[in-house]
Amino acid sequence: MAKVEVKQLLDAGVHFGHLTRKWNPNMAPYIYMERNGIHVINLYKTAAKLEEANEALKKIAASGRKILFVATKKQAKGIVAEKVSAVNMPYITERWPGGMLTNFITIRKAVKKMSAIDRMKKDGTFNTLSKKEKLQVDRLRAKLEKNLGSISDMTRLPGALFIVDVMREHIAVKEAQRLNIPVFAMVDTNCDPRDIDFVIPANDDAGKSIEIILSSVTGAISEGLTERKAEKLDASEGAVEETEEVEAIEDSAEVSEEATASEEAEEAKDEK
């Protein structure tokens, strides 16, 4: 896992916090200094926290659980969609659907409805509808795709949440807390880090800052997925070897039985 250097974080502007008058006092341990009325984040702590978060995310990915990314702010949408879809993880870049975690069964029903519409189009049922009904179904499908399309493969609750801007996504944080789902987040100087399990102190407004953190995080997840594949491959190879050994033992047992039977037959002949 490639470690992100402090110089790289500095170049990406990860150190820029909010105006001093907007700060949250709980972020004091992560603030290095104040300059021109703006707080500067301690990048050495950011690098350490990022490494810690990456290790935890890698383990979750290797265990086969999904990590749900949440980023509905304009400057983060495109970056999250690009980086996260590359590692085949679910993400929310539109409005957070209330009860997404706490009322997951209902959300799954909406996803199934989307699949049902797709089936209607494949089997020809859609063509039997009137023009007005077709339009209504298409609109419903487009709405579901926009809000839930990126989580259509998520069949159970995620193993963790990764959030960009915890103030904006406070409902997601509360839902995760209720269900004891660990929360990883980019936390700026105006946010409260106490609600977050894995804090990554960073500028959550600049595109470059978001991109460098997400590149590092998705890289760690990718490594975890690779490890999982390798373990599965080893397990299947081990099962094949075990089957071959069992077959070899059975074959040798059959041979010894045949040899014993022939010896007994010869002894019987001699006796006669």
Image (cartoon, rainbow, N blue to C red):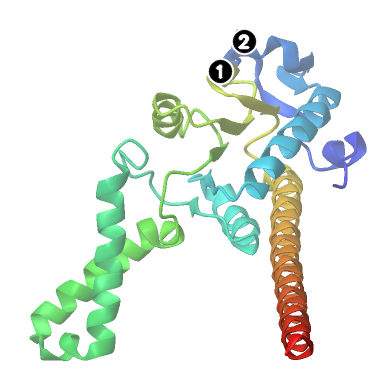
**What residue appears at the point 29 percent right and 78 percent down from the top-left corner?**
118
Q: Residue 108 is drawn in which quadrant?
A: bottom left
Mark 1 lies on residue? 192
**What residue appears at the point 85 percent right and 47 percent down from the top-left corner?**
1
| Residue placed most toward the observer, 182 or 260 | 260
Mark 2: secondary structure: helix
* Distance CA(mark 1)–CA(mark 2): 6 Å
| Residue placed most toward the observer, 204 or 172 | 172
Q: Considering only vertical position in the picture, is 214 above or below 259?
A: above
- Specify the label residue 107 is tagged with: none
Residue 16 percent across, percent down from the top left: 74, 29
Q: Determine contact: label 1, label 2, CB under 8 Å.
A: yes
Mark with earlier residue (1, 2): 2
Which three-letter amino acid code belongs to the residue tagged 2? Asn
Mark 2 lies on residue? 26
Number of numbered discs overlaid on the protein picture:
2
| Residue placed most toward the observer, 220 or 244 | 244
Q: Considering only vertical position in the picture, is 149 above or below 173?
A: below
